[in-house]
Structures are given as structure tokens and as C-alpha cells.
Image: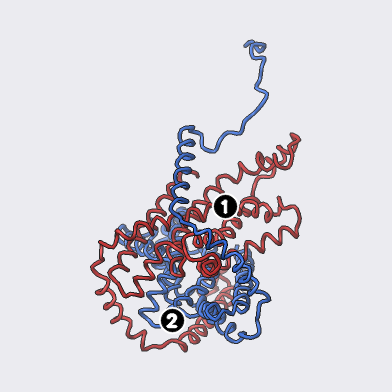
Amino acid sequence: MPVLETDKGPVWRRRTTRASLVTWFCYLIGVAIVVYCWELVSERTIWFFVQDAGVQAVDMATRMSPPKWSYMEVLWQPVWDTINIATLGTGIALVFAVPIAFLAAHNTTPHPSVRAFALLIIVSSRSINSLIWALMLVSIIGPGVFAGVIAIALRSIGFCAKLLYESIEEIDTKQVEAITATGAARSQQLSYGIFPQIMPSFAGISVFRWDINIRESTVLGLVGAGGIGIQLDASISTLAWTQVSVILLVILATVLVSEWVSAKIRAAII
Amino acid sequence: MTDLSEKTSYPSSWKKPPLIKRAWLRYLLWFGAAIYLSLAFGTMEVNWDRVAEGIPRGQKFLAAFFPPDFSSRWDSILDGMLESIWMAVIATVAGIALSVPVGLGAARNLAPLPVYLVCRSIVAISRTFPEIILAIFAVKLFGFGPFAGFLALSIATVGFFAKLLAEDIENMDPVQAEAIRSTGASWLQWINYAVQPQVMPRMIGLSMYRLDINFRESAVVGIVGGGGIGATLLTSFDRYEFDSAAAILIVIIVIVMGLEYLSGYLRKWVQ
């Protein structure tokens, strides 16, 4: 126990002198990095615009209110499209993510080189944002909901496969061994030994990703890939701020509902 | 003694129990899924002619990505990349600094009900809007450049981090908290010695994870004018310099992989 020797006897403290020096040194380096980064960013900021922001915010708030509720009639179709993009995208992603996850988990992969390849797929799909996927897909298959579905799917494959392969690696090997001991073939080992163990986390992951995808699919329209983002982009560029506020409220409501649904489903599974 | 000979025939086959035990619910779910899928595909309007047209174009498009051209735009790639990294770093730090009070307020076992409700709604609102929408408004209010991206990412960080911090505090071990409390510690000492040590290891891991997310998101806030590598990426798409775009994407992937490796290492070291 680290103590500080004083005239009145030892006093308890949290760290030894050495440990607290090391801690302070780490903090110092951290602060130095942050200050340096801040300097570099503030160099490129036009502070006049930042000072102006309060006035701008008040101006924007007055222009955004009251929300133009009659615009809702136009929005039902885009909201439906947004939900479809998220749902179908998640579904397609899961179809691809399951085999990739089995190839990437070190206890089920057929060969280390296959594993490296599967991990590369996972990392590339995860690193590139769905908006960038959508940007590319819109120029390949044209603007619309379909590009959005594929973009969401491509982005989700990595996420789902990563979480899934981690849960495959954490399974209880005894159950698989028991199944193997009955003389089960490799496919039977998978379906009776491994699948039942990862099923709850698989369901949890898919609902979790669906929830994230609802959020992401609301903005895909900014690059033309369908959903409510198209209306948002159009309303912002035509300066129809009363429509923008309706759209933002609709997005808020959609996301809150999807979060509630996914929380309910996850509570039911676990 | 019971008569054992009564039960002579055991079942010779076994069926895996279904995931959902109630049969009517299972069939209802299948039925609902089928109806939903037919409706969803019905309203999707895939223009297959356009897709068919697009596939050879897509091949040309993909061919244009290879080989990735690092050299001709290297200066702007490096510049945008560094800007993204600075932006991600300060956005993570500022976001976490802001989310600590919000997170403490959003934990039901620390905060009184009114504070709890206010903090929870801050979390809900900042979590709802994707980074890019926050960035659009930040750009409108604060002008182009990394400052707007920094603000958007910090707000998004608050939603993410405060929620997880609050959940972690709610799940902490109350025994230790009570022990510190019984020594007559003040509220600040209580937080510092009872709560913080319990949540710290997980929070360090999460902050690294958030840095990773912020870096990835900084690649898209640039598309709406928020600074960083996204602006460079969009420019190269607009100029049809797909080989440079491929180089940018590869650099993003490499940095994300590096960050992931680093955060895994750091998390192991902390625990």
C-alpha cells in the first residue's frame, strides 16, 4: 500500500511517487497532443464565421419554425423507403456475413490464408462509410433505393461478420467435441454444435445493426441513394427550412421507434 | 418398484428444438416476414435496365480504380489525412470531456430524476442524428473547414460516450461505492474513488474505439464541407480521378487497421 511518510506518521495515498509521476507524464503528453491538434485546426478556421454563429443559429431557428406539417404527405413514401433500405440491406449483409464469419474465426477457418483474406474483407467493408459506398454505387447502378440497399449491405457485412466471428471464437468447445464424438460430419458439427451456441448473439447482432442502419439510411439520399435524405437534401438546397424541420422531426421519430423496437426484441432474446 | 419393461420403444430419432418455442408465434413471424418482403420488393422499383447498363460501366469504373495512384495527389492526400486525424483527436477529447458530466447525470443511481431526464434527452437527441446531418448544420452555422467537422463529431461523441458511461455506472458494484461513502467522503471524492476506478478500464477502451469511429466519420463530414479527407475524396470523385480515390480509400483502410490494432493493444495493457 503506497503511503506518504509525514511527521505525524504514514498517510494513505492512492499511488506511489513513481506511479503518480508516470501518470502525470502520460497526462502531459496527452494534453500536449491535444493542444497541438487544436492549434492546427484553429489555423484553418475562419473565426469570423464562428463568432457569427449565434446570430446564424437564431436566424435559422426562426426560419425553421413553425414546421410545415402539410409536407408530411410527401414524406410517407421516403420513410417507407428508408426502412426498406435498412431492413433489406441488413438481410443481404447477414447472408454474406455468416460464411465470412466462419472463414474468419480461427476455430472454424479451413486455412490461415483464408482467414487473412476474410479479415481483409471485414476490415475494408468496415472502414468505408456507407455514404462512400453509396457514392460509388450511385455511379455504377444508378440513383435510387437499390443503390442504398447495396451500400448498407456492403457496409454491414464487415460489422456483422466481425461481431459474429468473435462470438464463434468464444463458443464452448466441449459441446462441439461432444457432437464430434457421436461421429457427426463437419456440416453436422456446424449445425448442431456451433449454430445453437451463436444463435442468440446472431439475433442480437442483426437487430443491433438494423437499428444502426435505420440511422445511416436516413442520410444516404444526400448522394442520391434513396430514402428520406433525398427530401432533406432538396429542402436544404431550396432553402425550404420549414420542410427541413419536419424532416428532422420525422427522422428523430423513426430512429426513436426503431431503437425502442430493437431494445424490445433484444430483451425478448436475452 | 416400477415396471421397466413397460417402456420398450424409445424414439430413434431426435429433432433440434426450434429457436422460438411457441409454434403460432413462429408461423406468424414467417408469415409477417413474407408479406413484408413482398411489399418491400414491390415498392422498390429496381430499374434493371439501368442496372444491366451499369454493370459494364461499373467494370470500367472499377478498372479505373486500379492501379491506385498515390503519387500525383500525394500532397493533398497527406494534408487531408492529417487534418482528419487532428479533427478526430480533438473531437474525441472534447466529446469525452463534455460527455463525462452528461454521463454522470444520465446514471439513475447518481442523479436525481430531473437531472436524469435532461441528460437522457441530450443523449437521445445527439445519438439520433447521424454525424453527417450534424455536420451539415455545423457547416451552415460555423462556416466551412475542420472546425465544423470537429463540432459535429464532438456532439456525436457525446451521445455515444455518455450513454455507455451512464450504463456502466448504473451497472457498477454498489458495495464499493457504499464503502467509500461510509468513510464520510464528499460527493467529488466519492466519484473519484468509488465510481471512477470501476468504470475507467472500459472507458479507456471505448475512447479508443470512439477515436476509431471519429476518424472513419471524418472521412464523410468532408463531403458536406466539414474538412478532412472527405473533401479530398469528393474532389477526386468529382474530377473522375478514381485512381487517386482508390489511394485515399486504401490509406483510410490502413489507418483504421492501425488504430484497431493499437486500441486492442491498449485495452489489453489497461486490463
**Looking at the rendering, which quadrant does residue A113 occupy?**
bottom right
Give the total number of marks visible in the rendering.
2
Chain letter behind tag 1: A
Q: Is residue A38 above or below residue A184?
A: below
Percent of width and height locating residue A118: 68, 59
- Secondary structure of the residue carrying numbered label 2: helix
Residue shown at the point (45%, 46%) measured from the top left: B36
Percent of width and height locating residue B46: 49, 57
Residue shown at the point (65%, 72%) measured from the top left: B63
| Scheme of colours in the image | by chain
Q: Which chain gets the red colouring?
A: A
**Looking at the rendering, which quadrant does residue A125 occupy?**
bottom right
Percent of width and height locating residue B239: 54, 81
Q: Is B88 displayed left or right of A170 in the figure?
A: left
Q: Quadrant of the N terminus of chain B?
A: top right
Question: Mark 1 packing: few (<14 Cα in 10 Å), some, or many (20+)?
Answer: many
Q: Quadrant of the C terminus of chain B?
A: bottom right
**Pointer 1 with pointer 2, Cβ within 8 A:** no
Q: Is A269 displayed left or right of A60 in the figure?
A: right
Let me know if marks 1 and 2 both belong to one chain: no
Amino acid bearing label 1 = Leu
Amino acid bearing label 2 = Phe
Residue shown at the point (42%, 58%) measured from the top left: A82
Q: Nearer the viewer, residue A93 or A231?
A: A231
Pointer 1: what residue? A94
- Secondary structure of the residue carrying numbered label 1: helix
Query: Drawn colour of chain B?
Result: blue
**Looking at the rendering, which quadrant does residue A136 occupy?**
bottom right
Pointer 2: what residue? B147
